[in-house]
Image (cartoon, rainbow, N blue to C red):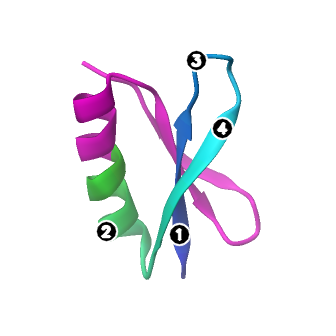
Amino acid sequence: MQTQVLMQATDGSWNSSKIYPNPLLAYIAARKLSRQEQRTCRTVCSSGQVLDEIHPQ
């Protein structure tokens, strides 16, 4: 299932990052991106359902 990573912008909107072939790879990438950018990230499946929301730690 293709999964997209979205990163929250400073204005609260969500910016598309990259599409991954499965949810696990997307989750790993979202955690890394969230940590690097200090922003909240989401993994979203192709139907638009949010799978995970990762907050910076």
Q: CA distance from mark 3 to mark 4?
A: 9 Å
Residue 38 picture location, percent across and down: 32, 22
- Disc sitting over residue 3 in the figure: 1
Q: Amino acid at mark 2?
A: Leu
Looking at the image, the residue that sits furthest to the right is 47
The residue tagged with tag 2: helix, strand or loop?
Answer: helix
The residue tagged with tag 3: helix, strand or loop?
Answer: loop
Relative horizontal placement of residue 11, taking residue 4 as reference (left or right):
right
* Residue 15 in which image quadrant: top right
The residue tagged with tag 4: helix, strand or loop?
Answer: strand
Q: Amino acid at mark 1?
A: Thr
The region drawn magenta spans: 31-57
Relative horizontal placement of residue 31, taking residue 54 as reference (left or right):
left
Residue at screen point 54% across, 79% down: 2
The image shows residue 40, relative to residue 26, as above or below, that is above
Q: Earlier in the sequence, mark 4 or mark 2?
A: 4
Mark 2 lies on residue: 25
Near mark 1 (Cα within 10 A), the count class, few <14, some 14-19 or many ≥20, is many
Mark 3 lies on residue: 10
Q: Earlier in the sequence, mark 1 or mark 4?
A: 1
Does the magenta-highlighted stretch encompass residue 3?
no
Relative horizontal placement of residue 16, taking residue 11 as reference (left or right):
left
Quarter in which the C terminus is drawn: top left
Determine whether label 2 and label 3 are within 8 Å by CB: no
Mark 4 lies on residue: 14
Front of the two marks 4 and 2: 4
The image shows residue 22, relative to residue 56, as above or below, that is below
Q: Earlier in the sequence, mark 2 or mark 3?
A: 3
Q: CA distance from mark 4 to mark 2?
A: 19 Å
Does the magenta-highlighted stretch encompass residue 38?
yes
